Image (tube, coloured by chain):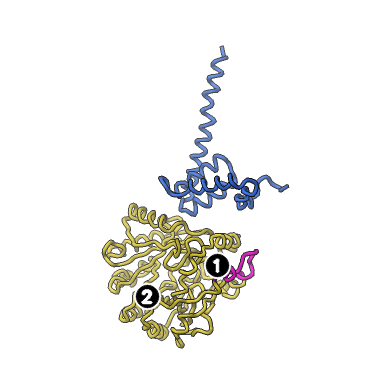
Amino acid sequence: MANHYYNSEDLGKFGNIGEYQKPLADKFFDYYGEVFKTSALTEKEKSLIALAVAHALQCPYCIDAYSADAYEKGYSKQQMMEAVHVAAAIKGGAVLVHGVQMMNKVNEIAM
Amino acid sequence: MIKSLKVLNHNLANADNQLAVLQNELNGQPFFSNKIATFGYTGLQATGIEVFQVNVGKMCNQVCKHCHVDAGPDRKEMMTLETMQLCLVAIQNPTIKTVDLTGGAPELNPNFRWFVQEIKKLGKHVIVRCNLTIILANKKFNDLPEFFKLYEVEVVSSLPSFTPDRTNSQRGDGVFEDSITALKMLNAVGYGVQNSGLILNLVYNPAGAFLPPSQSALQAEYKTELFKNYGISFNNLFSITNMPISRYLDYLLVSGNYLKYMDKLIAAFNPSAIDNVMCRNTISISWDGFLYDCDFNQMLDLKVNPTASQHLSEFNIQLLNTRNIVLKQHCYGCTAGAGSSCGGAVAG
């Protein structure tokens, strides 16, 4: 058993998931590769989206990978932080908008 | 201003110490020569000499953090007129089409303009690796754009980003702003302008411990951003991988990125780049007239194979044309990803 739930070296072993179930892993990695190719959006734009999503999911592997990738593709530190703020705003907004549900319930039962 | 490793008497100013890092800090990484052997290459042989690259001196007005030459204002090595004359004899060979002048800032050599004029008399194409800021460094260099134009010199200039932050973090405070001014001066005499015939190419190299992104995507972005923000146009963008040599090697070691960077280069090894690496059709000349397979081998003091001639005074193109290239671990830099050369990516 590893000493930590997350080990940075494990990112490089991502492909190993195919050892237990190759056909599904192959399908996933093919799809993954295709998703990140330049199409209607550029590879660079997709990298910044991935960075924001990685923060929203708080996936340390994804944050490592896409912090490097977005910077290597030319985004500035300021642009990358703004992307993280977008993720934070959506996450925060997602919490707060549920406040309406809370209000609905309270209004339903309050005198 | 940052001092050169040499003036600081730094351990890595010595080429043997750099080679010791490259050869000993392997962490299980395969030797380059063994790696290419798995693709059927028993060594690498030159295919001839088309490009004659001359380092006319290590003096530079800039002190870039990644410089593999360890150039700077405190470097005094300068090619003499006599060595330039030996170059002029060597390049008379008709297979040599291009003379590529580099440094340091090549324009700082007092015989630079004379050398360009003499090379042009021989009908050769001339490339000058101009750092841009030299044009503004002193009044006497302000007319360089006109000089380049007069002799139809191809200008190749580093600009690691179309934004100030990355450029200045790598090349020094204010370099971006001066580079933009210099690019406008080059554009003003026709460089980089469509149908002018005056070629202005830019060079991207990463400002950090990572590999360059796609050259074509980057070129498109540079063209859009530089024109939109500054009205600047240019011909091509060359993306160049940083070599683990000299100041960049020092940066990698100090920042704890050395092994990870070498792993990146090796993981990105692209066998289709091997046939097109620049050392196969290039010869690199040092300020004191010695011969090397490339500018990187020159900085590691790895002279051409001793069975070929090793100095301009004994230049023998027949022997050099088929020489075996001297290979070390830094060669992974030229075969990573889309490959890398002084002319940018070499493989798709």
Place of residue B275 in the rendered image (x, y in percent of width and height, measured from the top left): 47, 69
Q: Earlier in the sequence, mark 1 or mark 2?
A: 1
User: Residue B331: in sight, yes or no?
Assistant: yes
Looking at the image, which residue sits at the far right? A1
- Label 2 marks a residue whose chain is B
Tell me the residue that label 2 is attached to.
B98
Q: Are marks 1 and 2 on the same chain?
A: yes
Tag on residue B52?
none
Place of residue B180 in the rendered image (x, y in percent of width and height, measured from the top left): 36, 60
- B94 horizontally vs B299: left or right: left
Mark 2: which secondary structure? strand
The picture's colour for chain B is yellow
Label 1, label 2: how far apart the Cα atoms are: 31 Å
Quadrant housing residue A110: top right
Residues at badges 1 and 2 in contact (C-beta under 8 Å)?
A: no
Mark 1: which secondary structure? loop
Quadrant housing residue B89: bottom left
Q: Give the blue chain's letter.
A: A
Looking at the image, which residue sits at the far top? A111
**At 50% from the left edge and 60% from the top edge, which residue is drawn?**
B337
In magenta segment, residue B30: yes
- B100 horizontally vs B245: left or right: left
What's the amino acid at mark 2? Answer: Thr
Tag on residue B39?
1
Query: Which sits in the foreground, B211 or B321?
Result: B321
In magenta segment, residue A66: no
Numbered range of the magenta stretch? B21-40
Q: Quadrant of the C terminus of chain B?
A: bottom left
Mark nearest the camera among 1 and 2 is 1
